[in-house]
Amino acid sequence: MILNTITNGVVLDHIQAGGAMEIYKALNLDKLECQVAIIKNADSVKMGKKDILKICEPIDINLDVLGYLAPGVTVSIIEDGTVVKRKHIEPPEKIVGIIKCTNPRCITSIEQELPNIFKLTDRENLVYRCIYCESKCKKQGDIK
Amino acid sequence: MRSLIDIKELTTQEIDELIVVAKDIIANPAKYSEKCKGKKLATLFYEASTRTRLSFEAAMYELGGNVLGFASSDNSSASKGESVADTVRVCSGYADIIAMRHPKEGAPLVASMHSLVPIINAGDGGHNHPTQTLTDLLTINREKGRFDNLVVGLCGDLKFGRTVHSLIGAMARYNNIKFVLISPDELKVPSYIKQELDKSNIEYVETRSLEEAIPELDILYMTRVQRERFFNEEDYLRLKDTYILNMSKLSKAKDDLSILHPLPRVNEISVEIDNDPRACYFEQALNGKYIRMALIMKLLGVE
């Protein structure tokens, strides 16, 4: 399959195979007017299969959302057909206002104005816990 | 300014210091009778409590201070929809220190983010209850004279029992502690606590049988299955009488077992055990006042 190269935009590479749609939704890429290519199950030497997202417009990516959902992804910024910046995304230590605590006993369940804050408590297993009630977040289901 | 939201915020050295002060208060109460003269404690209790609230109030009075506050959310602006943050901003202008109990987990942490005075978490839902843990630790220290080399059994509601979670966290920091976690499958200790124990290589076993576990225990921490933690009345009724400690079960225990219970008790410890020398739960309730006196002094910076 051949896709045009991007002149100006962003490429998210090394997404776990099958994970592109989730990132597409979480980063609100569906709201963009520009071309967005979702490449699923591309061959990868390192990963076997991988997904790739190509966005044909320079946009700000929420790296906390990306780092939470897909640590290990590579973000490349393309300008005039050249990669000007490439970043390997690590899981953020703290995520604010991205995921919502689903524990009905948590104070955030009754005080809606409180910021939802989660901390990375186990880097190895990528476990995030609510700072208020210490409940583990349930990945996709908790995304606001 | 320092608050106490989670027992883990105190080092073992600080806990030892609090215990030394509490024991000195027990030995020389008169020496402490004016330590907090002119100071006020606000007890913001959004949920019913007898021991915790009264022991906080008694503690402040015995230190020569005064107390104000409310004993249920119906009597506060929370019933009008006021946020914890707003209530605390206001109350921290009226008092020098605040003890807060709230049914929602994390409420005292929110309070500490907005308060001008120290906040003491007096219990937040099924989450933390650090002053109960300090009470438990003072009791264990007075009964056993040590915190290490102990087999600690915890029995009953280990899922929602906040006192259990805090006590495990606190005791896990001492040497050669083994936990025996006795509960029905539905009320097991949450996985994050077990992960912490695994990470620290602390020995624990899970069992459903109190009879089988009791002979090896140095401490048996009984808990009540709490109606207020269940969304479903059927589940509560099914599980509430799962473990009842009676003389027949106690006959298999060590002679120097110490039986603790955060109280209130419903029927999980038969009254026939109250006069057994191994029953420590009423002394434990009294210890709560002394350790809270020590804590209030510490957080107010009173020497």
Image: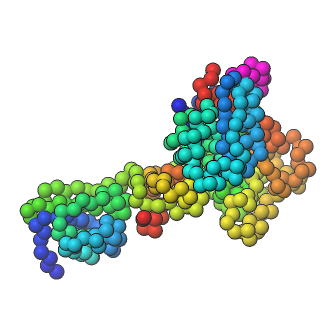
Is residue B234 toward the left or the right of residue A87 in the image?
right
Q: Front-most of B154 and A141?
A: A141
Q: Indicate the quadrant where residue A7 lies.
A: bottom left
- Residue at x 76% of width, y 40% of height: B54
B178 lies above or below B25? below
Residue B32: percent from left, percent from top = 73, 22
Is residue B235 toward the left or the right of residue B90 in the image?
right
Q: Front-most of B202 and A113?
A: A113
Residue B92: percent from left, percent from top = 58, 36
Observer able to see residue B245: no
Observer able to see residue A79: yes
User: Is B264 part of what is drawn in magenta?
Assistant: no
Residue B121: percent from left, percent from top = 62, 43
Count of numbered circles on the image: 0
- Residue at x 73% of width, y 68% of height: B233
Is residue B216 toward the left or the right of residue B42 in the image?
right
From this viewpoint, which residue is outermost toward the top? B31
- Residue at x 17% of width, y 66% of height: A57
Q: Main secondary structure of the magenta part?
A: helix
Q: Front-most of B196 and A95?
A: A95
Q: Indicate the quadrant where residue A6 lies.
A: bottom left
A45 lies above or below B69? below
- Residue at x 14% of width, y 76% of height: A3
Which quadrant is the C terminus of chain B positioned in?
top right
User: Is B34 part of what is drawn in magenta?
Assistant: yes
Residue A89: percent from left, percent from top = 29, 56
A45 lies above or below B222? below
From this viewpoint, which residue is outermost toward the left? A80
B93 lies above or below B230? above
Magenta region = B22-35
Q: How is the image coloured?
A: rainbow
